[in-house]
Image: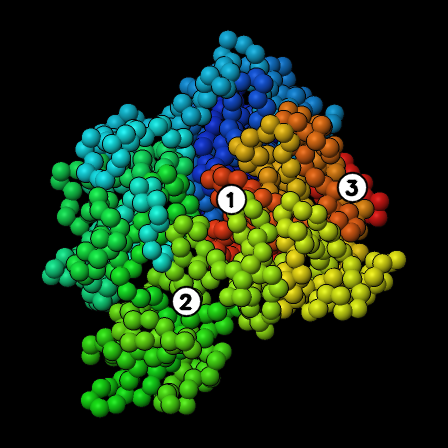
């Protein structure tokens, strides 16, 4: 019997229609007696997916299909059942604003009519719905199969399904035709493009006036992709000098201004700072100029500056322009295009992205829009010339590098003089004829996040800036010093302030005690948060982003500390990995630098060590217990926690981390429970371990499928690299069930995946069982089992590092060991940010257990 129309309460409850342009739900429409409609909407929300909707009983039954429909009958696409939508939603296209449920861009990718084969209500109840589609892109016979469906089950049981194309004349092998790539756009759009305006395309390579190799090939056709709502920029690493292989790099001028990323979607133009703040309203003239670009949609990356009378950037004038509201003088130098006209260009080599830039500007483009050029010149000569012209320095970019939303050693900055940001912690009394203040007290954060005093700056101010800065500082007055180290008595402090203002300062160098030489104030920076300000240490461009200190071995690297007492490292010069040439001293130095990021993952948990006295390739020792003073600085837990053994290990301080590193520890593994509640796990882990023959794209897709299933089960998961071949999916838990229940449930989830996607997953360990497949390891969820900690180095050739990830980064991740001891410092700026929400996330398992039919032994 057909279901009766009713209200769409779940749909309405999830949305704020005062803030979202989506149509209201209300009551379902009367059931149609004619043709039934279907629609597939391409939805670029937190993760790009396709919403598959079938009209029935006056509403749209809806499934989220993470990978989208496929015309190949061999390819089964997971479809996660979601709430019913109103019929009016079938024609919705637009942008759901940030902060709303489903925030992101929606287009109608396909629509038409559908015809059920047999009674659709019976098919839904059975979990086997067959139907014909008559759309623009999708035709022929299809089937939706519910995973683990039961007879008589509710048609809206919120269980995952599989969307499968049946074999008929409309079926096509995926390796011959990918309908998502071939036809990515909206079926509602007109050929003329937005607002009836003819679409403009980037100019060809021949029009570019950039330094490129003579044999540079035309850019290949990059993948189609919806335009993301947000994009973080790629950041450059300060380098001590140009790399030896100069032909592998392109060099541009370094512009002294504010980083600006622009999102263009038709006539909609939004300008964002490097930290995601929307500055469009501050830049009305620039936003209007950007609408003239030859771009239908895309993300543009560049720097805004104000030029002096010689044409060089003047940072002080840029800040004055914002203070006075006179932003018409601002110039936008464009130097990258990560997305363009429906395509994701991030995986293209930089050299191939760069040749597209001149074509963005037309002959009538406003003069404030410029394209940054690469120069045919030796980098040292170019740097000298740039400094003579009044520029801060130059930026080098590897020709073959991809665009990544992080600080990367593939982009380097070479400066003509020392210059960086500092946090203002107070000011001194004015003297002589000066008013407002004498000098600013400056500091930088150390690796523990403590603000260290590093001197004063008292020159570079004009009278107007003095008054403005004093007014801003007085609003931040503090009773005590924000510095972790005392300010010398010779400094006549008038007032301390909260450490929130950031100054850009040029200086000639550093003293031995960490103070600035000859500092000169350049301006305040409103685009960089104070908490991120640290001392910039030049890296060797040939070392993958490592600082000089990190490359040293022997006695020079034998002492290290991370806000902790220095320790002596024996045999620091010994090479522990022949593949990378890394030494024991470099490893210990890394653990000293990363301790503030790593300790939150280690502290209050039992920890196991993988010790490698002979280095990678030698014999490894796995240590879970110790007694007496066997491991100095390491906390030994009560032996009663693991009966029959000596005490488990716990690392709560940087000294302990450095101590075990000195004792030849490469890897550190943690339990899935804390020491105080060791009988109740507070997280569950799925380790995606690819078998022989599994290529990396399949590993990425595997992680997406695991996340999709967990999401359908109502579980929020987090992601990290393993530092090896695979990925780790981590589910934080409420402390309710014991080890056996959590392990049993995780096994049921993995068996569910292997049963319904047998071409991808296997639930049995052993290399023979997983050839061409991914073993999702659930065995790490038992009592005493451990998993490598975030930020731990792996005892494998190349010394990969396990790093927390945001799910949005998965699409451009290149390997499970993308970060290694050689380049992980470039990732430290991102830190643990991708897991910020984990502390407030505690998943309950009861409902999820019922969904997969698992009965826990300790229920």
Task: Specify few, some or many for label 1: CA neighbours under 10 Å numbering under 14, 14-19, or 20 or more.
Answer: some
From the image, state whether disc 3 or disc 2 is nearer to you. 2
Tag 2 secondary structure: loop
Judged left or right of residue 232, residue 636 is right
Q: Which mark is residue 103?
A: none
Q: Residue at x 44, y 51 (%)?
A: 543
Q: Earlier in the sequence, mark 1 or mark 3?
A: 3
Is 720 left, or right, of 670 in this rendering? left
The residue that label 1 is drawn on is: 818
Distance between the alpha carbons at the discs numbered 1 and 2: 25 Å
State whether residue 499 appears in this view: yes
Residue 760, position in %: x, y?
63, 28
Q: Is residue 434 above or below residue 778?
A: below
Q: Please report the residue visible at 43 percent of the width from the left and 66 percent of the height from the top.
A: 534
Tell me the quadrant of the picture where the N terminus can be found. Answer: top right
Choose between 183 and 518: the one closer to the eye.
Answer: 518
Q: Residue at the location (32% across, 30% down)?
A: 219
* Residue at point 46%, 70% (across, down): 445
The foreground one among 101 and 694 is 694
Q: Is the Cβ of the residue at disc 1 closer than 8 Å to that at disc 3?
A: no
Residue 217: quarter of image? top left
| Residue 458 spot, x, y in % from top left | 28, 80
Q: Position of residue 834 (x, y in %)?
A: 52, 52
Q: Secondary structure at mark 1?
A: loop
The residue singled out by tag 2 in the image is 535
Residue 731 visible (yes or no): no
Residue position marked by numbered label 3 in the rendering = 744
Q: CA distance from mark 3 to mark 2?
A: 48 Å
Mark 3 lies on a secondary structure that is helix
Q: Residue 208, position in %: x, y?
A: 20, 36
């Amino acid at each position: 019997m057909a279901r009766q129309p009713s209200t769409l309460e779940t749909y309405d409850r999830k949305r704020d229609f005062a803030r979202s342009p989506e149509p209201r739900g209300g009551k379902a429409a009367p059931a149609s007696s004619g043709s039934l409609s279907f629609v597939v909407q391409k939805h670029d929300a937190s993760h790009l997916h396709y919403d598959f909707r079938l009209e029935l009983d006056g509403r749209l039954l809806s499934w989220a299909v993470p990978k989208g429909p496929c015309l190949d009958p061999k390819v089964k696409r997971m479809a996660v059942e979601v709430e019913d939508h109103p019929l009016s939603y079938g024609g919705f296209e637009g942008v759901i604003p940030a902060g709303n449920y489903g925030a992101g861009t929606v287009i109608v990718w396909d629509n038409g009519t559908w015809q059920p084969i047999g009674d659709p209500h019976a098919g839904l109840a059975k979990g086997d719905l067959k139907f014909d589609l008559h759309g623009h892109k999708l035709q022929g016979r299809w089937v939706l199969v519910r995973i683990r469906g039961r007879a008589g089950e509710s048609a809206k049981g919120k269980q995952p399904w599989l969307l499968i194309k049946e074999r008929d004349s409309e079926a096509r092998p995926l390796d011959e035709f990918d309908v998502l790539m071939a036809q990515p756009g909206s079926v509602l759009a007109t050929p003329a493009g937005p607002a009836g305006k003819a679409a403009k395309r980037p100019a060809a390579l021949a029009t570019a006036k950039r330094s490129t190799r003579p044999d540079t090939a035309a850019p290949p056709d990059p993948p189609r992709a919806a335009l993301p709502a947000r994009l973080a920029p790629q950041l450059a690493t300060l380098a001590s000098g140009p790399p030896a292989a100069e032909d592998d790099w392109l060099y541009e001028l370094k512009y002294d201004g504010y980083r600006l990323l622009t999102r263009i979607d038709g006539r909609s133009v939004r300008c964002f700072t490097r930290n995601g703040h929307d500055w469009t309203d501050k830049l009305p003239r620039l936003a209007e100029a950007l609408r003239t670009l030859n771009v239908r949609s895309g993300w543009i990356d560049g720097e805004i500056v104000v030029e002096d009378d010689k044409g060089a950037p003047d940072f002080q004038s840029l800040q004055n322009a914002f203070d006075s509201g006179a932003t018409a003088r601002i110039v936008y130098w464009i130097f990258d295009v990560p997305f363009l006209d429906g395509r994701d260009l991030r995986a293209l080599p930089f050299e191939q992205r760069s040749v597209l830039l001149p074509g963005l500007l037309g002959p009538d483009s406003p003069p404030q829009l410029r394209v940054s050029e690469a120069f045919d010149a030796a980098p040292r000569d170019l740097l000298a010339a740039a400094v003579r012209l009044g520029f801060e320095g130059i930026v080098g970019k590897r020709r073959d590098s991809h665009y990544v939303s992080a600080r990367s050693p593939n982009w380097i900055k070479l400066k003509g003089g020392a210059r960086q940001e500092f946090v203002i912690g107070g000011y001194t009394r004015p003297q002589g004829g000066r008013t407002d203040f004498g000098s600013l007290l400056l500091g930088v954060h150390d690796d523990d996040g403590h603000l260290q005093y590093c001197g004063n700056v008292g020159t570079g101010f004009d009278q107007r800036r003095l008054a403005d800065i004093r007014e801003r500082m007085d609003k931040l007055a503090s009773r005590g010093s924000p510095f972790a180290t005392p300010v010398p008595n010779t400094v006549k402090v008038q007032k301390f302030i909260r450490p929130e203002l950031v100054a850009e300062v040029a200086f000639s160098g550093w003293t031995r005690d960490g103070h600035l030489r000859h500092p000169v104030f350049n301006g305040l920076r409103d685009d960089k948060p104070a908490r991120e300000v640290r001392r910039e240490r030049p890296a060797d461009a040939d070392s993958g982003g490592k600082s000089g200190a990190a490359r040293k071995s022997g006695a020079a690297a034998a002492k290290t500390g991370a806000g902790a007492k220095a320790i002596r490292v024996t045999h620091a010069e010994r090479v522990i990995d022949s593949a990378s040439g890394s030494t024991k001293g470099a490893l210990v130095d890394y653990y000293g630098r990363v301790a503030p990021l790593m300790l939150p993952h280690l502290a209050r948990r039992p920890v196991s060590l993988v010790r490698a006295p002979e280095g990678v390739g030698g014999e490894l020792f796995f240590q879970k217990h110790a007694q007496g003073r066997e491991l100095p600085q390491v906390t030994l837990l009560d032996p009663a926690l693991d009966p029959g053994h000596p005490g488990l290990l716990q690392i709560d301080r940087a000294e302990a981390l450095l101590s075990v590193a000195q004792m030849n520890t490469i890897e550190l593994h943690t339990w899935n429970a804390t020491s105080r509640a060791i009988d109740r796990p507070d997280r569950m882990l799925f380790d995606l371990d690819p078998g022989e023959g599994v290529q990396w794209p399949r590993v990425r897709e595997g992680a997406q499928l695991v996340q999709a299933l967990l999401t359908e089960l109502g579980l929020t998961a987090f992601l990290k690299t393993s530092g090896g071949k695979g990925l780790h999916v981590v589910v934080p838990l409420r402390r309710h069930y014991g080890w056996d229940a959590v392990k049993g449930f995780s096994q049921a989830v993995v068996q569910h995946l292997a049963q319904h996607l047998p071409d991808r997953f296997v639930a049995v360990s052993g290399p023979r069982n997983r050839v061409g497949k991914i073993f999702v390891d659930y065995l790490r969820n038992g009592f005493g089992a451990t998993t490598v900690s975030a930020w731990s180095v792996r005892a494998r050739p190349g010394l990969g590092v396990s790093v927390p990830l945001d799910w949005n980064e998965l699409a451009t991740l290149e390997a499970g060991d993308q970060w290694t001891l050689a380049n992980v410092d470039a990732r430290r700026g991102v830190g643990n940010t991708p897991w910020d929400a984990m502390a407030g996330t505690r998943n309950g398992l009861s409902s999820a257990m019922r969904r997969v039919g698992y009965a826990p032994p300790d229920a």
